[in-house]
Amino acid sequence: MTTPNLETIAAAFLGYIPHMRECGLSLVRGSPEGVELCLPFREEWVGDPIRGVLHTGPITVLVDSSCGLAVLAATPVPETIATLDLRMDYLRPALRDKDLYCRAECFRMTTHIAFVRATVWQDDREQPVAISQSAFMRSSTGKPWKPEART
């Protein structure tokens, strides 16, 4: 069996789950060491129109999706995963008219759990909007993830 490349995995993963597809998430770069996704700005992401601050919901979608893809990138063959725990620490407001970026890396993998950390920013990676640490359940069946099997 041939292992698909990360671009193929990312396209399938980001297109497989409806809310990721609807948000317009895209792969910026990636490797088994980590992935970077982009969430393009939309006016409907603004949660505080007076201050021009984005709602935290889309940021959480970006992080959860980036972390999940980082787990898939770190496995030899993509497998079924599920978010077990996702901790978000918001450090500063995300502002309107700017895309959001997230870098996620799977830093520890056990037989059943994958541990991931992530950083979100807009203009400057050194000025993060949020950081995250999460845990993902790995498939206990050992079956590879096949997005085309879902109807």
Image (cartoon, helix red, strand yellow):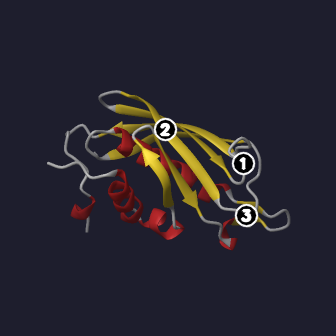
| Whether residue 113 is situated above or below residue 121 in the rendered picture | above
Q: CA distance from mark 3 to mark 2?
A: 28 Å
Q: Specify the amino acid type for callout 3.
A: Gly
Q: Quadrant of residue 141?
A: top left
Q: Is tag 3's residue or tag 1's residue first in the polypeptide sequence?
A: 3
Which of the pair 80/7 is nearer the observer? Answer: 7
Other-residue count near label 3 (Cα within 10 Å), few / some / many at <14 / 14–19 / ≥20:
some
| Whether residue 16 is situated above or below residue 116 in the rendered picture | below
Q: Which mark is residue 105?
A: 2
Q: Is tag 3's residue or tag 2's residue first in the polypeptide sequence?
A: 3
Q: Is tag 2's residue or tag 1's residue first in the polypeptide sequence?
A: 2
Residue farthest along the right direction in this orientation: 50
Picture residue at 47% right of the left edge, 62% below the top: 20
- The percent position of residue 51, horizontal first and vertical second, equals 84, 62
Looking at the image, is mark 2 or mark 1 nearer the viewer?
A: 1
Which residue is disc 3 drawn over?
47
- The percent position of residue 4, horizontal first and vertical second, equals 26, 52
Looking at the image, residue 89 sits to the left or right of residue 68; the answer is right
Which residue is disc 1 drawn over?
124
